């Protein structure tokens, strides 16, 4: 008993020592939505402890949350509360977790003026981050990933702005926003379909209600852009059909990408496991881009 | 001038980073009455520590040898860096050019399952401070070595807690391998030397197919990671194993990545395997401080 307490106390101490990265919470004004949103920014120890005249710019990973979530999710909902800190330290990477509203799907909605999240993430947030921190102000030093709605957001936004990001990743991503492909109860599918109709207008008949707004309709754009891509999905996830569909399409049109299926479902346990592989992938891209800090 | 300086600095950085120690040692085989070499990479922390270390057994592919991983990987420091980063001993034993790491029913001088699971482990555990338990032992490899690591793990759940395969040559019957006929014939003759002619002993080939071991892998419950390049001639057998493991609900990581049967692919793949194993070892409490 005593041993356990001692060990856990020691563990806490160790965690505090290891957690050398610093976390900022930042207001990010959005002119397009005329409101201010927030983002957490994890700065690696190397950044925090740099001497004043050291102006080494750091690469940035933009990490998006999922549906009904917030900017705090990645820092508070993982069982391992210091995972982001450790990854930032290990790879000398700034990790930014912005707010994407609970159900924005990171679209610029043609109908809802207060939901302009493509503009927010791709322009307003990048400006704010690049003007606040020593970042690499170039696509070469910018990568983007996310979970679920955020996996869709990362792939979707980067597919429309290949000039801004050099790689994209999705964990358990909504690769098809046609809720008929989701293995979920009917009432949940209905509520999400209504949300898409509110954001994007009435759906088209058939299997692709919103062409151009979902990844399974953008395989050729992904091929054309040529960004390194990584996406993964749990074999028990309700979104596996859309992920397999996108993988199949990218195989057919010969778009290089990493695709992984793992044990697990749509859970934080799954994302805690998945994230380090995504960051490993990005670290290779950044190294190849010659912007990684060794 | 500046370039020379930078080059010098980067060389220095490389040298100082490569702190892991590379041993090579003789590993005698009683069962085959011959002695073969192995390379062992010890993490930097090993020398100054008294702790017991987990061991990753890393197998080479067909037509290869024990030193392939440290000589043929384009990044010559990758194995050393991974050993340092994860505080792991990485042992690379000999599997000859076409043993498939199995105990051949027809050739007494090709008994590599026994060699790997008894003689190599015995030698490593008696030479280094290792965790002498399945909890601290993991195994992976490329191509023939991917096959070998899954076969040995399937046959010896008491020895390994996790196993991986990169571009694994999973089925000796070569069904759905995408190779030109002359290469297929050449490899078929090699399989005949260790298993006999497939026309006469189809059941031997079936028994030695990792694809047919899906239920054994399920029963064992080891952590598994399997990947293959989408342009690899072995992609279909890997997909078949994945399909069977999904169907019988065996937890496993399965990835498809760009690339073919190449060292670029394996260099890219290996860090994912080591990350995967580090999670298993951490969960087992088998990490060196």
Image (spheres, rainbow, N blue to C red):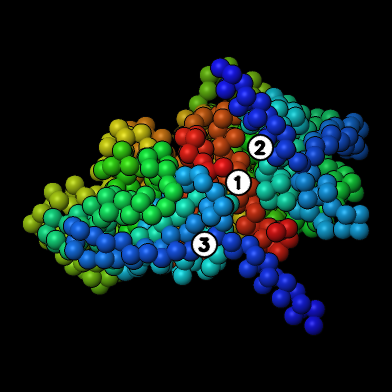
Q: What residue does disc 1 label? A: A278
Frontmost of labels 2 and 1 is 2
User: Distance between the Cα atoms at labels 1 and 3?
Assistant: 29 Å
Dot 3 lies on which element? strand
Badge 3 sits on which subunit? B
Mark toward the start of the polypeptide (2 vs 1): 2
Residue A116, percent across and down? 81, 36
Residue at 32 percent of width and 59 percent of height: B144
Residue at 26 percent of width and 43 percent of height: B155
User: Distance between the Cα atoms at labels 2 and 3?
Assistant: 30 Å
User: Distance between the Cα atoms at labels 2 and 1?
Assistant: 13 Å
Neighbour class for label 1 at 10 Å: few (<14), some, many (≥20)? many
The quadrant the C terminus of chain B occupies is: top right
Question: Are labels 2 and 1 on one chain?
Answer: yes
Find residue A83 and name its label: 2
Q: What residue does disc 3 label? A: B21
Question: Are labels 1 and 3 on one chain?
Answer: no
Frontmost of labels 2 and 3 is 3
Image-quadrant location for residue B23: bottom left
Residue B147, percent across and down? 32, 53
Badge 1 sits on which subunit? A
* Nearer to me, B19 or A80: B19
Image-quadrant location for residue B229: bottom left
Dot 1 lies on which element? helix
């Amino acid at each position: 008993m005593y041993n356990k307490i001692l060990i856990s106390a020691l563990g806490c101490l160790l965690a505090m020592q290891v957690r050398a990265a610093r976390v900022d919470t930042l207001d990010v004004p959005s002119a397009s939505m005329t409101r201010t949103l927030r983002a957490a920014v994890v700065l690696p120890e190397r950044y925090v402890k740099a001497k004043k005249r050291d102006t080494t710019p750091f690469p940035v990973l933009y990490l998006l949350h999922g549906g009904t979530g917030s900017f705090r999710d990645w820092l508070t909902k993982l069982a391992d509360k210091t995972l982001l800190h450790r990854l930032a330290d290990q790879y000398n990477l700034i990790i930014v977790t912005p707010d994407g509203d609970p159900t924005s799907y990171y679209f610029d909605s043609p109908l809802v003026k207060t939901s302009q999240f493509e503009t927010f993430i791709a322009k307003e947030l990048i400006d704010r981050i690049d003007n606040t921190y020593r970042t690499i102000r170039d696509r070469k030093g910018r990568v983007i990933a996310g979970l679920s709605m955020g996996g869709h957001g990362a792939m979707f936004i980067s597919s429309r702005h290949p000039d801004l990001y050099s790689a994209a990743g999705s964990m358990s991503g909504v690769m098809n926003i046609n809720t008929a492909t989701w293995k979920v109860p009917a009432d949940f599918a209905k509520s999400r379909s209504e949300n898409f109709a509110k954001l994007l207008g009435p759906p088209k008949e058939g299997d692709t209600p919103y062409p151009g707004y979902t990844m399974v309709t953008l395989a050729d754009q992904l091929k054309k852009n040529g960004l390194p891509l990584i996406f993964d999905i749990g074999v028990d996830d309700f979104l596996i059909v859309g992920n397999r569909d996108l993988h199949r399409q990218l195989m057919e049109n010969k778009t290089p990408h990493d695709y992984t299926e793992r044990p697990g479902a749509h859970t934080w346990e799954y994302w805690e496991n998945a994230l380090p592989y995504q960051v490993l992938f990005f670290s290779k891209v950044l190294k190849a881009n010659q912007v990684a800090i060794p | 001038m500046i370039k020379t300086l930078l080059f010098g600095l980067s060389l220095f950085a490389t040298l100082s980073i490569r702190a892991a120690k590379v041993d090579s040692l003789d590993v005698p085989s009683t069962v085959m009455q011959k002695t073969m070499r192995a390379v062992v990479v010890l993490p930097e922390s090993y020398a100054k520590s008294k702790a017991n270390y987990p061991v990753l057994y890393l197998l080479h592919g067909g037509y290869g040898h024990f030193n392939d991983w440290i000589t043929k990987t384009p990044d010559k420091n990758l194995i050393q860096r991974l050993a340092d980063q994860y505080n792991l001993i990485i042992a690379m034993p000999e599997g000859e050019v076409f043993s498939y790491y199995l105990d051949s029913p027809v050739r007494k001088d090709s008994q590599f399952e026994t060699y790997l699971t008894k003689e190599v482990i015995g030698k490593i555990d008696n030479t280094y401070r290792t965790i002498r338990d399945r909890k601290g032992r993991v195994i992976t490899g490329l191509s023939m070595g991917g096959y070998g690591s899954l076969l040995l793990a399937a046959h010896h759940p008491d020895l390994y807690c996790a196993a991986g395969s990169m571009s694994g040559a999973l089925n000796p019957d070569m069904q759905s391998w995408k190779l030109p006929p002359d290469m297929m014939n050449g490899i078929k003759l090699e399989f005949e030397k260790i298993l006999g002619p497939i026309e006469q002993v189809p059941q031997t080939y079936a028994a030695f197919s990792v694809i047919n071991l899906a239920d054994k892998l399920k029963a064992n419950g080891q952590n598994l990671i399997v990947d293959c390049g989408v342009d690899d001639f072995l992609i279909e057998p890997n997909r078949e194993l994945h399909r069977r493991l999904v169907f019988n609900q065996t937890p496993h990581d399965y990835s498809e990545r760009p690339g073919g049967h190449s060292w670029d692919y394996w260099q890219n793949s290996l860090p994912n395997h080591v990350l995967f194993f580090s999670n298993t070892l951490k969960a087992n409490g088998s990490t060196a401080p």
